[in-house]
Image (cartoon, rainbow, N blue to C red):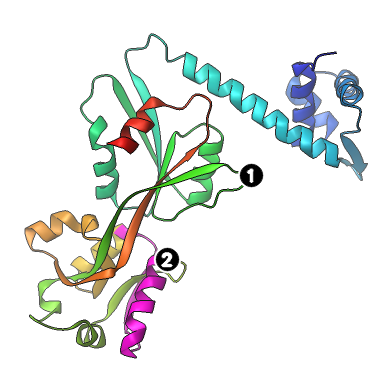
Amino acid sequence: MELNYHHLRYFRAVALEGNLTRAAAHLNLSQSALSIQVRALEDRLGHPLFERIGRRLELTEAGRIALDHAETIFKTGDELIATLRQTGRARRAIRVGALATLSRNFQLAFLRPLLNRSDTEIVLRSAGMAELLRGLEGLALDVVLTNEPVPRDAATPFLTKRIAGQPVSLIGVPERGKAGEDLGTLITREPLILPTAESGLRAAFESLISQYDIVPQIAAEVDDIAMMRLLAREGAGLALLPPIAVTDELTAGILVEHARLEKVIESFYAITLTRRFPNPLVAELLHS
């Protein structure tokens, strides 16, 4: 007997709710009808999928395996519909998620090959990493831009591609530095605006300056590049930034690079998910 996908959908609803009554109300079914559907799936698979603990229905080991497969099946179906609905449309959309703290100039550079194209619509969303990865898994996003790689494992088959990298600099208003100063003198005298301790960039910077036996004066620890740029413009200190984040200010002379740290690299990554029907615009961007 073949698998009944209606049974699978009903099972998934109960698994997500953890309660037969709420799941039945959500599906607009009677509780007894829903219970019969779930038992039919259990009979087909040959294993109990739930065990009752208090008032909740908890998944058994077989139930957890079944739910994993059900999620994959329904995501594939959603992806198929979303892809085939594009057929015959004059414009194709690409949905890009970007870490909220990521350089806007970098995002613009990444998207530039698709700008001013009559056949393309760009949907750009900013959020924290956890929310972006959920969007990617749920097919609400096609690609995520970040400055931190994402681990890949069997449960979350994310694909991480490094797409750019550049040395960072200590950047500030012109009067913060003096011509010909070495790095040790600069960080001894000037307050610093640094990424937070969780940042890989911060760890690389601290490793570099450890050779100078200096305890730097930290003016601010910030997890947002836009705020670091504003603090540097206000003269609050020297900000550890990739130059691409302050291109306009450097061009105008509002800010200057007081020291280029060639051994401290800011890397940029594109995160995608293994998909049966990938958005072709993503490949276009990654290859450009």
Residue 155 position in % (x across, y down): 64, 43
Residue 82 position in % (x across, y down): 50, 20
User: Is tag 2's residue or tag 1's residue first in the polypeptide sequence?
Assistant: 1
Q: Which residues are magenta?
A: 200-225
Q: In percent of the image, x 15 and y 78: which residue is there?
A: 176
Query: Can you say which quadrant of the picture contains the N terminus?
Result: top right
Q: Quadrant of residue 2?
A: top right
Residue 173 position in % (x across, y down): 14, 71
Residue 169 placement, left or right of 138: left
Q: In the rendered image, which residue does mark 1 sit on? A: 154
- Is the residue 106 above or below the residue 261 in the image? above
Is residue 205 in sight in this rendering? yes
Q: What amino acid is labelled 1 in the image?
A: Ala
Element on which disc 1 rests: loop
Query: Can you say which quadrant of the picture contains the C terminus?
Result: top left
Residue 183 position in % (x across, y down): 21, 81
